[in-house]
């Protein structure tokens, strides 16, 4: 629970405090927020991949295929559901991106939090002997 608070609640609280305390600075920095968010997401995902580099390399093409299928499915489903619901083309494309991106963040962050919270010594530590 503490890790979830650090990853979710603290950034939101800090952003709300900054917006209330320094509104003009927040307005000036707002155009750079998406770039910073993408950079943070890349850093989190890269750290998860780096920690599991041997397993990722060993899984090779199977893992790459599964990842591509997962993301293509997320993008496609987000677009298709939007279009069926009558959402205009441009918004449907945006929705397809927005459907998939938080999932990617959540996968990396939850994996990282689970590893540090539940498996600090790796998953083998909880295996019965």
Image (cartoon, helix red, strand yellow):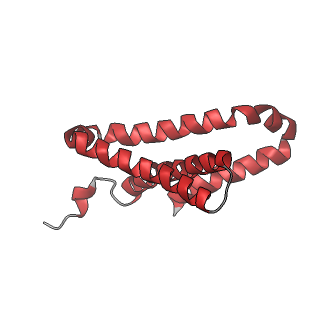
Q: Would residue 5 be seen by someone viewing this image from the given angle?
A: yes
Hey, which residue is sitting farthest bottom in the picture?
128
| Residue 27, image x, y percentages | 82, 37
| Residue 9, image x, y percentages | 63, 56
| Residue 77, image x, y percentages | 50, 56
Identify whether 32 is placed above or below 17: above
Identify whether 13 is placed above or below 28: below
Task: Tell me the quarter of the image containing the C terminus.
Answer: bottom left
Residue for point 24% across, 63% down? 126
User: In the figure, is residue 84 to the left or right of 60?
Assistant: right
Give the number of callouts: 0
Q: Nearer the viewer, residue 11 or 68?
A: 68
Hey, which residue is sitting farthest left in the picture?
129
| Residue 73, image x, y percentages | 43, 53
Q: Would residue 112 be seen by someone viewing this image from the given angle?
A: no
Q: Nearer the viewer, residue 22 or 26?
A: 26
User: In the figure, is residue 81 to the left or right of 121?
Assistant: right
* Residue 28 found in image quarter: top right
Q: Nearer the viewer, residue 4 or 35?
A: 35
Residue for point 62% across, 50% down? 92
User: In the figure, is residue 103 to the left or right of 127?
Assistant: right
């Amino acid at each position: 629970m503490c890790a979830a608070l650090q990853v979710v609640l603290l950034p939101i609280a800090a952003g709300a405090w900054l917006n209330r305390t320094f509104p003009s600075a927040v307005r000036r920095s707002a155009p750079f927020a998406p770039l910073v968010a993408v950079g943070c997401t890349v850093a989190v995902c890269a750290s998860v991949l780096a920690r599991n580099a041997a397993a990722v390399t060993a899984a090779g093409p199977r893992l790459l295929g599964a990842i591509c299928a997962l993301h293509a499915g997320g993008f496609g489903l987000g677009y298709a559901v939007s279009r069926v619901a009558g959402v205009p083309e441009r918004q449907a494309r945006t929705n397809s991106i927005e459907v998939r991106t938080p999932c990617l963040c959540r996968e990396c962050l939850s994996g990282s939090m689970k590893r540090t919270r539940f498996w600090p010594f790796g998953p083998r530590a909880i295996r019965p002997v």
